[in-house]
Image (tube, helix red, strand yellow):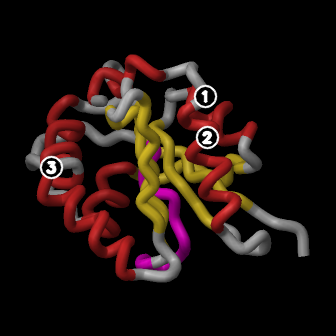
Amino acid sequence: MPTQYAGLVDPAAVDAAVSQTYSPAAITDCMERCRQASNAFFLVAARSRQVAGFLHFDCFGPEPELHRLYVDGRYRGAGIGTLLMNELHARLPTELEYMLLVVAGNDGAVRFYQRHGLQVAQLVDGLVYYSERMGVNFPPDTRPFSLVLMRRRTSH
């Protein structure tokens, strides 16, 4: 996973975020919280009984958020991300609006989410967001990085 951020995010920031939010304990906790909530989903896509990708969406923070969609590098371009997004949207109320963040410069991800109905809203400070919203502790000399805030808006 960290290779997709090469050249876009300080490796120290990637290491801190991955070790604190993608550890087996953190993922297990996330899955359990989603299992217990009616407005949260942790979806897993499998191929040949192997995890090919997963998606985490919840309404625990200040607004509904698609926190992560990860597809194993061996399966990128095989439709796993689209499968997960379609399943999420099938489970959500049609009027529910939500946000997600993409690392600035990851133009392929921005285009992917645009194809799934999300729009670019603004840039945000990645260090501030991950620190305040997700509780990630970064080393003091971590270089700042930007995130593209995207929103799924529905017609009213």
Residue picked out by circle 3: 23
Q: Which one is in front, 27 or 103?
A: 27
Q: Is residue 110 magenta?
A: no
Rendering coords of residue 4 (x, y %): 37, 24
Q: Name the amino acid, label 2.
A: Leu
Residue picked out by circle 2: 83
| Mark 1 neighbour density, 10 Å: few (under 14) some (14–19) many (20 or more) | few
Stretch of the chain drawn in magenta: 60-69
Q: Residue at x 30, y 52 (%)?
A: 127
Residue 84 versus residue 77 in the image, above or below? below
> Is residue 102 visible in the rendered structure shown here?
yes
Rendering coords of residue 82 (x, y %): 63, 37
Q: Name the amino acid, label 3.
A: Ser
| Mark 3 neighbour density, 10 Å: few (under 14) some (14–19) many (20 or more) | few
Residue occupying the far right of the picture: 156
Count every numbered label the image shows and give the total. 3
Q: Name the amino acid, label 1.
A: Gly
Which mark is drawn over residue 79? 1
State the CA–CA distance, disc 1 to disc 3: 26 Å
